[in-house]
Amino acid sequence: MCGIIGYCGPKPMANVLVEALKRMEYRGYDSAGIAVRSGSELTVIKRAGKIAALREAVPAEIPGDCGIGHTRWATHGGVTDHNAHPHLDASGKVAVVHNGIIENYAVLREKLSADGVEFKSETDSEVIAHLIGRLYEGDLTATVQQVVQLLKGTYGIAVLHIDEPGTVVGARNGSPLVLGIGEHEMFLASDVTAILGHTKQAIYLEDGEVVTVTADEYRTTDLNDRKIDKNIQIINWELEEIEKGGYQHYMEKEIFEQPDSITRAMQGRLDHENATGHLGGLNMTKKELLDLERVKIIAAGTSYYAGLVASYLIESIARIPCTVELAAEVRYRNPIVERNSVYFAVSQSGETADTLYAMRELQRKGARVLGICNVVGASIPRESDGGVYIHSGPEIAVASTKAFTSQLTALYIFTLLIARMRHMSLEEGTRFVQALEEVPERVSEVLQSAPAIAELARKYHSARSFLFLGRGINYPVAFEGALKLKEISYIHAEGYSAAEVKHGPIALIGPETPSLFLVPDDALREKVISNMKEVQARDGRVIAVCVEGDHEVAALADDVIMVPKVHELMYPFVMTVPLQLFAYYTALELGRNVDQPRNLAKSVTVE
Ligand code: F6R
């Protein structure tokens, strides 16, 4: 979604701002712009379309002592140069970039229009610039503190004023904003990837905070100008991690990183002697863990599917009821928080609005909510009552891949921990630990099938629609496979339980609609084979993901992808990776924009 950058310092403005916007491209956007302050001049350049269009319009050098920039993902008003940020006030002295949604913008706009203000865009954001322009009396910080109190909704903003040399003021409510502290330079950004090339020292703003930034100083306050002391945190990502490192796409790189990212997610968290998990960040006593009667998981998209896989595991080996719910649905149905329950908010970005707001509502009702997140310092981990970082490293491709398998890893370790406190024996625990530790190696083996999967993508890429079918713990993997394919190739795909096909979806089966079956050698294998035969009897083409040496399935299916044999609970890892590759290569065949598929944003910070 939208990205913000602000800069105060000596480096060439145009370069710093445009480069930072480029780093945030992955979030998804449809227009971009910058504003640079110099003397009595404000240079504003905005373009609909890609950063490349903006870069072309921006002169190599724009003199200036501070600047702001923005990538916009349209919500209010179409994708036009006018609607792109920064927005100016009527005097042209104030420039504002805004992430989030101003819910009362229509009322504010009406009032301003009645006072004679002419709006240049259809956005909700422009009202902020006009309000600041009208209320400014020589102190930008004070004006921002005053104006944000008139706003309802969510915002992360960066503002500059012609009369305040070398100064950018930022404020946040519900949309992330981070201050980057460099050597005689400061940055404001919505995303640390924008500033990683310059500094690793960061301060994360909280809702209701305002920051005033110059090249050498910063001051954080609340809305009543009371000073707030903030801790500087060190960003633990490396610049190389946000580069493609020789791969054609970020998604390809991130799929291939999984043996490492899964290993990182389990590092230091497995206690071999006691065959259990060790998760320091849960902030739960042994007694609280032992007393747990219910686990609930809230999440969106791919993270939701990771939660669904975990629910099978938690119920089967820890024998605790576990429910998984779409976060967007939880918030508005007045959820019941039960005693001795724990919630997990699973989110790669840690900023997904649906998940964050649901978490807050649950906390208001007294729930203990733990985060399973990747981005350190994001809103969900900061506001949760504890949790686990998955340490996947930056996930830049819009389609989530390595975060999914690392979320699974964290949830598997949590399950092991509570299972060992209950029914699981030392021997079973030891087998589970060994099996989990073997996963990175097995995933490496799956990755060797990439050329064969690319071949399959060539064969099937013209299909109009796909069914992904699995059962048991691999049933949610079918959902994830379908989501990957639809979001990056734009081919319609649905995940179903293989058993459910005969209850309706079988009507879709025919040569045009291939089915991809997940057939691990688990207790449900025979049943899945029967479901495969039902599909084939109706002229459905079948790709089977099955276990090496499964000649029966290989002989039945039109095409197969072989995965190594693993512990039966570890199949979600090795079955997901081929589906990621299949989606990736299919999207390549179709010439799609793999890393930034149409209409999608990496971090969905609106409801
Ligand atoms: C799919 C995808 C999305 C996200 C969803 C939640 O590939 O990336 O479905 O999984 O938007 O995002 P997070 O995990 O950041 O909360």
Image (spheres, rainbow, N blue to C red):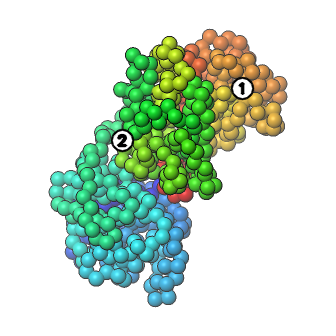
Type of the residue with mark 2: Ile
**Is residue 585 visible to the viewer in this orientation of the structure?**
no
Compared to 386, does 183 lie above or below?
A: below
Type of the residue with mark 1: Val
Residue 419: percent from left, percent from top: 52, 25
Residue 375: percent from left, percent from top: 40, 44
Compared to 509, does 368 lie above or below?
A: below
Q: 124 or 414: which is nearer to us?
A: 414
Q: 432 or 503: which is nearer to us?
A: 432
Compared to 194, does 60 lie above or below?
A: below
Q: 544 or 502: which is nearer to us?
A: 502
Q: Residue at x 29, y 53 (%)?
A: 203
Residue ID for mark 2: 242
Distance of label 1 from label 2 (alpha carbons) = 37 Å
Q: From the Cβ of disc 1, is ligand 1 less than 8 Å away?
A: no
**Is residue 603 visible to the viewer in this orientation of the structure?**
yes
Asked which quadrant contains residue 511, the reply is top right
Please, what secondary structure does the residue beneath circle 2 have?
helix
Residue ID for mark 1: 542
* Sequence-first disc among 1 and 2: 2
Residue 170: percent from left, percent from top: 33, 65
Most extreme residue toward the bottom, as rendered?
A: 115
Q: Residue at x 25, y 80 (%)?
A: 138
The disc at residue 179 is none
Q: Residue at x 43, y 31 (%)?
A: 286
**Left or right: 420 with respect to 537?**
left
- Determine crowd level at label 2: few under 14, some 14-19, many 20+ residues with C-alpha closer than 10 A: some
Please, what secondary structure does the residue beneath circle 1 have?
strand
Quadrant location of the C terminus in the rendered image: bottom right
Q: Residue at x 52, y 34 (%)?
A: 291
